[in-house]
Amino acid sequence: MTNFQGKVAIVTGGASGIGSAITHRLLEAGVKVAVADLNEAKLKEMEDANAGNLIGVVANVTKEADIEALVKKTVEAFGSLDFAFNVAGASKAGAITEQSEEDWDFTVDLCLKSVFLSVKHEAKYMKEHGGGAIVNIASLNAHVPMFYGAAYSSAKAGVEMLTKNAALELAQHQIRVNAILPGLISTPLTSDLTKVEAINDAYMDRIPMRRAGEADEMAGPALFLVSEDASYVNGASLLVDGAWAVSGYPDLSKFM
Ligand SMILES: NC(=O)c1ccc[n+]([C@@H]2O[C@H](COP(=O)([O-])OP(=O)(O)OC[C@H]3O[C@@H](n4cnc5c(N)ncnc54)[C@H](O)[C@@H]3O)[C@@H](O)[C@H]2O)c1
């Protein structure tokens, strides 16, 4: 993957987990990075450790004004915008019959509306400046429902379709847009669930590789999708899930 030196990227949700792993891999490859997050203290720490190569931008990705300001600050600091990784996300779980409108809106706004706003403003800049490449983080839950995750799964399915629509509309402007669908990844987002042994065992029963992925294992696929090596990959959904998606059938190996 060769086209990284001197490029400029935005990573939303880059102060933790998958976004942080992508940010560090970009820095290693010579990319200047604007990290957008709510976690001001962590952003400051990252900025201090990478002065000149990284800016932290306190932004709420569900607010259009914050996203517009993010793109503006990125270009002011580093002179262009070549790549964007729209990673920020979280959810409020709830049974469909019990979930409040407020919790539904929180989840769908954070996971889906934020990706629309991000792609909108990132692509607006890119189409006037020769193109670029965007990666949206969806989830295996774009394809597979999850108990008490109706809002999250619906939003992630929306991210996958938004990615395809964006690829359709933006190809004419030399902008590629792809999605990554992670399976179970060890980050602060999942640690409350996986530290419960019975829940962790239930996950492991379904994941053929019998382990969660590390955040760093999302970084290579993400960088590949924006690289020249992926120059004809557009509108794609890349599952990075330890083969979880193919394990719908019960595991018969224990009976053989
Ligand atoms: N961890 C997994 O197993 C997994 C699986 C599939 C998909 N994903 C998706 O990957 C993405 C990253 O998840 P993660 O596991 O790294 O989570 P994480 O909690 O480690 O990181 C999420 C980051 O997003 C930031 N954030 C939250 N709300 C924000 C807002 N309104 N504005 C700006 N920043 C905000 C948080 O401060 C945090 O730094 C999410 O979209 C998540 O849905 C994660």
Image (cartoon, rainbow, N blue to C red):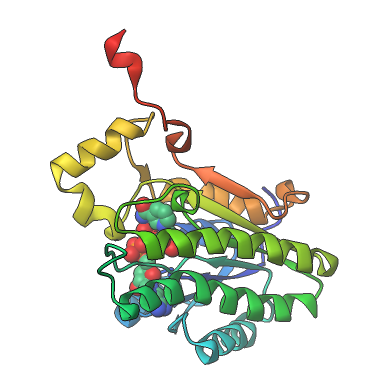
For this view, does 96 lie left or right of residue 124? left
Residue at (50, 48) in percent of width and height: 143
What's the residue at 74%, 52% (across, down)?
A: 228
Can the viewer see residue 240? Answer: yes
Q: Quarter holding the C terminus?
A: top left
Percent across and percent down for residue 45 are: 34, 75
Q: Residue at x 67, y 67 (%)?
A: 6
Above or below for 177 versus 74: above
Check the image and report above or below for 7 versus 211.
Answer: below
- The front one of 20 and 123 is 123
The mark total stands at: 0
Q: Quadrant of residue 165?
A: bottom right
User: In the visual, does 146 lie left or right of 129?
Assistant: left
Residue 31 placement, left or right of 176: left
Where 68 falls versus 201 (above or below)? below
Residue farthest to the right, as pictured: 172
Q: x and y percent of residue 210 in the render? A: 32, 31
Q: Position of residue 185 (x, y in %)?
A: 36, 49
Eyeballing the image, is 209 above or below 26?
above
- Residue 49 position within the rendered picture, expressed as x and y whole percent measured from the top left: 39, 71
Q: 99 or 215, which lies in front?
A: 99
Q: Locate ligand 1 by image quadrant.
A: bottom left
Q: Which residue in the rendered view is the most extreme toward the top?
A: 256
Residue at the spot x=17%, y=48% of the render?
195
Image quarter for residue 191? bottom left
Q: Is residue 17 visible?
A: no
